[in-house]
Image (cartoon, grey):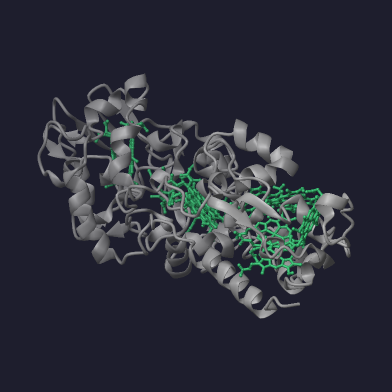
Amino acid sequence: MIVSVRKIVFVSSVLALMALTGCTTPSKEKAPQDTEAVKTEKVKAAEEKPAEVTAETQTKAETPAAVEAPAPVEAPAVAEVPKPKAGAEEPFFEPNLLSEKEVVHPPFEWGDCTVCHKDKNPDKSKNYDLIMDTPDLCYQCHDKDLKEGKKFIHGPVAAGACTACHNPHKSPNKRLLVASNINELCTSCHTAKGEFLHKTDNIHPPVKDQCINCHDPHTEDYKYQLKADGKKDLCLMCHADKKEWIEKAKNKHGAINRPNGCQECHDPHGTGQPRMLKADSIMNMCLTCHNEPLKRDEDGVTLINMAKHLEENPDWHGPIQWGDCAMCHNPHGSPNFRMLKKPFPSTFYASFDVNNYICFECHESKKVTEERTTEYTNFRNGTKNLHYVHVDKKKGRTCRACHDFHGTKDYPHHLRKKTKFGKINFPIRYIETPTGGSCAPACHARRYYDREKPIVNTK
Ligand code: HEC
Ligand code: HEC
Ligand code: HEC
Ligand code: HEC
Ligand code: HEC
Ligand code: HEC
Ligand code: HEC
Ligand code: HEC
Ligand code: HEC
Ligand code: HEC
Ligand code: HEC
């Protein structure tokens, strides 16, 4: 045998290396930022903020017009996540395997047919008998280990059917393949995947490109001949930006540490849903786990059963009506309290800082910062802004003192029934009037506000 087996081994490993390192994908999400960075970012976001949810538009909340709002509102809420790079749609390997010139297998080109055939001239004698069966025929020169030496061996390779995919003589396609497109080759046997590719919208781009971006056609150490563990490591090979998030973010999401990793929420090939999610909306995805109290990994604090909370409190906050929990939470982790995309104070009282409220991504901050107003909020006594009174101070109350951000039932304006202060739940006993309202939490006696005829509260 004249062929240098070592050379083949070398070429093969270079090819394998190229396949591994050629794997690049545009980075979409920035590494977790500290609060400082988020703040400067926010100033920019605020400038491009296209629309505000003002007191006026909110009163129309139940009309379709308000529900159409997600488009303008979305931009600032996801400001941290840069736009995909131009050209993200382009294939990043070589899906077209059609070779510029015909590929001829060297032993065939040499003309010594007896390397593989018993007969010197099989063409003329019509005796095509091989000197031995595949794959051993091929292993005369090719390294057996590279084809089946790892833990998981692809069905046809294990069966020795090398010629199911390669023409032993010549081919118009690279790697002597019998098809000019990898996905056609794979789906010629994996017909169910082929049907799936044709009928499903929003296929994962590397799948549309070519199956071997993730699967080795011969053998690999990971189940399904994947190039890395398919639950998480494989994904992070290309989505390196997510690695930063899930490893470095201060508040990590327990979902990703569950046994199926990224696949808890995403299907690796596609689902027909945006972002290859396994549920028909982001909210329903979240509620597959948040349908029971869950404990935070960091400190064991129990989180409420969100599905139950939403079921019992059907007046849902706008973004939840749209089914999009990810407008506020980053499902991959975040440096902020409760994995929020922007900061929000974690305590009942907080020194007011306009940059510390994710709320102002969608709501006008002036509803809190203007001491006197007739337009920015309805929570005012005459022109005296009661949001300002309660929130905008050194020991300001955070929005949670009065509002629930997911869903409510008893009062309008997402006012909560009870406010948790320390270990005690105080009922706020809100009463609305056409021009104002009143409440009587334990913090003070019943106090009234009226936008038209300001009320003097004596106690
Ligand atoms: C690297 C090994 C190898 C070499 C070298 C080789 N053949 Fe083949 N040949 C095969 C295999 C394997 C098959 C069976 C193909 C199959 O299973 O579909 C085959 C089949 C054939 C057939 C049957 C029809 C067909 O194309 O499937 C002919 C004719 C043939 N070879 C001619 C030749 C001639 C002539 C040469 C020398 C110029 C040659 N082969 C060199 C491996 C080889
Ligand atoms: C007599 C030695 C020999 C035998 C037997 C042999 N090959 Fe090869 N094969 C080679 C050489 C030499 C190359 C070229 C390697 C290179 O480019 O460095 C090659 C290359 C290939 C390539 C890559 C072609 C490309 O375009 O990159 C494939 C695929 C391949 N062989 C498949 C097979 C299969 C399948 C069999 C068994 C049916 C087989 N070989 C049997 C010597 C052999
Ligand atoms: C299911 C289809 C399939 C089967 C079966 C198959 N191959 Fe391949 N083979 C491929 C594909 C696809 C590539 C191209 C991989 C790439 O470009 O990264 C390839 C590449 C190769 C190459 C060149 C690059 C390398 O990895 O060394 C050789 C040599 C090769 N195959 C040999 C074999 C041998 C020998 C067998 C039988 C033991 C076999 N193949 C069985 C699909 C197959
Ligand atoms: C010649 C037919 C054929 C071709 C072509 C083929 N496969 Fe397969 N594939 C099989 C068979 C047979 C099995 C084993 C099925 C089993 O064990 O249930 C298999 C198994 C698999 C598995 C593991 C599935 C499981 O449930 O364990 C994956 C992943 C896979 N193939 C991917 C591919 C990819 C990617 C390609 C294209 C490079 C490809 N196949 C091309 C026949 C083929
Ligand atoms: C982005 C990486 C990636 C690409 C590209 C990819 N797959 Fe997969 N594939 C996976 C992962 C991850 C699994 C394991 C799923 C699991 O753990 O249940 C898998 C599993 C499979 C399986 C076995 C389980 C099943 O879903 O039936 C088959 C068959 C398969 N892939 C075929 C293909 C084919 C065919 C292509 C090309 C059309 C392809 N894959 C492209 C990542 C990928
Ligand atoms: C708890 C469910 C969940 C888990 C687990 C999860 N994701 Fe996501 N992922 C989502 C949701 C929801 C979106 C859509 C976010 C949006 O629209 O803002 C998304 C979006 C994405 C996107 C596209 C948009 C972007 O932010 O770049 C990528 C890429 C992604 N996820 C990768 C991963 C990877 C890699 C893992 C594993 C490390 C993972 N995801 C784990 C829920 C999840
Ligand atoms: C071979 C590289 C590669 C691998 C491996 C890979 N991806 Fe991707 N993925 C991409 C590319 C390229 C895009 C399209 C550009 C983008 O959105 O970042 C993409 C997009 C996505 C998207 C957004 C899809 C959409 O609808 O916008 C999600 C979600 C995603 N990948 C999740 C995953 C998960 C989960 C895994 C692991 C099972 C994974 N990816 C493995 C390359 C890869
Ligand atoms: C696969 C199960 C699973 C899914 C799906 C899931 N989560 Fe979680 N989530 C958890 C677990 C477990 C915890 C508690 C462990 C931890 O993160 O510390 C948690 C914690 C949280 C926390 C508290 C984080 C903190 O730092 O205090 C928030 C907020 C959250 N999830 C929101 C979501 C949102 C929004 C979605 C949908 C995009 C979602 N989850 C989907 C399992 C899941
Ligand atoms: C408008 C922004 C916003 C949206 C949309 C949103 N959340 Fe939240 N979420 C928050 C804020 C703010 C907190 C912190 C609440 C607190 O500590 O008072 C929070 C807290 C949580 C917690 C922790 C609750 C606890 O017991 O401390 C979970 C779990 C959670 N959200 C899940 C979800 C899910 C699931 C969705 C979608 C159904 C969702 N969130 C939608 C803003 C939002
Ligand atoms: C992603 C955009 C978004 C974010 C972020 C957001 N909201 Fe909203 N909010 C809306 C939309 C849209 C409405 C109108 C629909 C409704 O009544 O829920 C609304 C309505 C409200 C209402 C009721 C208005 C009324 O008069 O009925 C209150 C109170 C409220 N939000 C408080 C908050 C608080 C507090 C935060 C911060 C934790 C916040 N929102 C963050 C989009 C957002
Ligand atoms: C002390 C209780 C209290 C606190 C704290 C509070 N709110 Fe309100 N908020 C109200 C009341 C009461 C209304 C209803 C006003 C009306 O329509 O009569 C309201 C109404 C709203 C509305 C509907 C539009 C409007 O302004 O009339 C939004 C949006 C809102 N609040 C956001 C917030 C945000 C964001 C925070 C935290 C920065 C916050 N609120 C803190 C009591 C409070």
Above or below residue 141? Residue 71 is above
The reply to whether residue 66 is in sight is: yes
* Residue 395, quarter of picture: bottom left
Quadrant of the snapshot with the N terminus: bottom right
Q: Position of residue 266 (x, y in %)?
A: 57, 48
* Residue 242, quarter of picture: bottom left
Asked whether, in this view, residue 435 is left or right of residue 344, the answer is: left
Which of the pair 330/368 is nearer the observer?
Answer: 330
Above or below residue 184? Residue 176 is below
Asked whether, in this view, residue 435 is left or right of residue 268, the answer is: left
Asked whether, in this view, residue 229 is left or right of residue 87, the answer is: right
Farthest residue, direction front: 124
Q: In which quadrant of this rendering is ligand 10 seen?
A: top left
Q: Residue at x 51, y 60 (%)?
A: 253
Q: Position of residue 143 (x, y in %)?
A: 73, 73
Above or below residue 279? Residue 331 is below
Which of the pair 393/90 is nearer the observer?
Answer: 90
Q: Position of residue 153 (x, y in %)?
A: 77, 63
* Residue 302, quarter of picture: bottom right
Total numbered labels placed on residues in the image: 0
Which of the pair 57/215 is nearer the observer?
Answer: 215
Quadrant of the snapshot with the C terminus: top left
The reply to whether residue 301 is in sight is: no
Q: Position of residue 275 (x, y in %)?
A: 50, 44
Which of the pair 229/331 is nearer the observer?
Answer: 229
